[in-house]
Amino acid sequence: MKLNRALLNGSIILIITFGIFNVLNYFYHFSMIRSLSLADYGLLATLFAIIYIVSIFAESIQTILAKYSASENNGGKLKNLFNRSIKKATSFAVLLFVVYIAGIVILKYGSIFLASKFLGLPHVAALILEKLGNLPLGLVIFNGIIILGVFLSSVGRGIMQGRKMFGRLGVSMIIEGIIKLVLGVFFVYLGWRVYGALLGPIIGAFVAFIYTLIALTPIRKMQEKRISTPEIYKYSWPVFITTLTVLIFYNLDIIIANIVFDRDTVGLYAITALIAKTIFFVTQPINRAMFPLAAEQKVKKEKTDSYNVLTWAFISIFVCIIVILAVIYLFPKFIILIATGKSLPSIESLLFYSAIGTSLLSFANTWILYQLSQGKVRHAALFPIFLVVESVLLYTFSANLLEFVLAFMASSAIFLWGSIVLLKD
């Protein structure tokens, strides 16, 4: 098994740049933990979870564009792909924002009453609607503004990922992270609380999009030629479903926690999840590098080289996970102290189990992305079943935080097993 230097070089670049972005992101969250009350931070974490789920479409766009630009060397055709994608992404983002606002308004002023009185929904459904409907309307609407910035950025980042422009892709993330941190902290310092915490990421997303325009200037200056992508819509639907499942799975625990626990407990769990999910963020750069390389080998019909890319991706991710798990297991108190500036004994014993759950999810995500890079999308429609499993487990085992974390770990193990079975060769 030869060393895959392209994966190694790309992974190193992205690990460094995404690592800087993740450090900035964690500084942002840790600053919010220190600056906001537990209840306010729990609310902020819930709002981020909602927008992450809404942004699934944007993540799908980036994955699709990365695949189709990985094997296209004609600059004029890449320009056409970029321009057409920008137009469609803008239209869809505006539509999604309108639907998002309409859904929130309905939840706020009508659904709770209808669900509990007329539709005869089970207690769980009525409770979910009630909790979501009780979120501050102004904050939820303000939170939705980021949709457009995220969608536009995903187009440029998809092209850069596919063309293996890993350095510029990473720089776009760093720029977003710096603005998110600096302005977020500044606005909270001004006393704008959760509104200020959200405004930093909103501005950061739009500035990151401007950078992608600059980074792709050589392509945008080319003589445009129409690119033929006859199978892109057929490929898009399975990509959307699998991406939807992974990102909702990743964020659903925070939303369920907001339903079954009080605000302060939600804040404690949000801190636990944030630290544990470091693993997911650390392994993402490896996946970003793996995807276009594996897709390129698929086009060249080099199956052995494609498996080589996957093997080295798994080895790299395994090493990262073992190191992080060891640190979390040995120094939970110190990690929490560094992250929050205070001692929280109630969550020290939870960190390792939560980190194992995230590790299993990371392996599942790597396997899914590899199969998507190979165009293997059979049984994608069955993936939402794992969201049902996670929801049932988390809601059922919610007597305390330990039960809740163990339920997340179990649901992650089921998700990993299921993804291997559904997408196996």
Image (tube, rainbow, N blue to C red):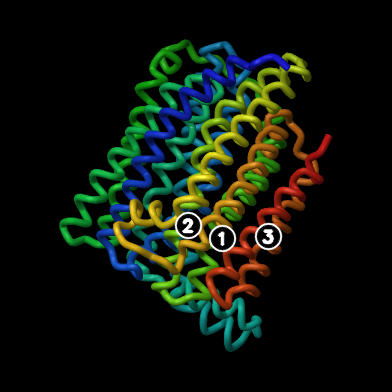
Mark 2 near mark 1, Cβ–Cβ under 8 Å? yes
Q: Mark 2 is on which residue type?
A: Ala
In this rendering, the answer to whether 111 lies above or below 281 is: below
Q: Earlier in the sequence, mark 2 or mark 1?
A: 2
Query: Would you identify the image quadrant in which residue 25 lies?
Result: top left
- Residue 252, numbered circle: 1
Q: Which element is circle 3 on?
A: helix
Towards the viewer: 28 or 2: 2
The percent position of residue 236, horizontal first and vertical second, equals 66, 38
Residue at x 38%, y 21% (from the top left corner): 215
The residue where tag 3 is placed is 410
Res. 49 mark = 2
* Placement of 53 over or under 231, stated as above or below: below
Disc 2 and disc 3: Cα gap in Å?
A: 21 Å
Q: Secondary structure at mark 2?
A: helix
Label 3 CA crowd tier, 10 Å (few <14, some 14–19, many 20+): some
Is the C-beta separation of discs 3 and 1 under 8 Å? no
Q: Residue at x 61, y 43 (%)?
A: 362
> Which badge, 2 or 3, is on the more N-terminal residue?
2
Q: Which residue occupies the extreme right position in the image?
A: 425
| Of residues 298 and 28, the one drawn nearer to the viewer in this rendering | 28
Please identify, in this view, whether the residue under mark 3 or under mark 1 is nearer the observer.
3
Q: Is residue 49 left or right of residue 207?
A: right
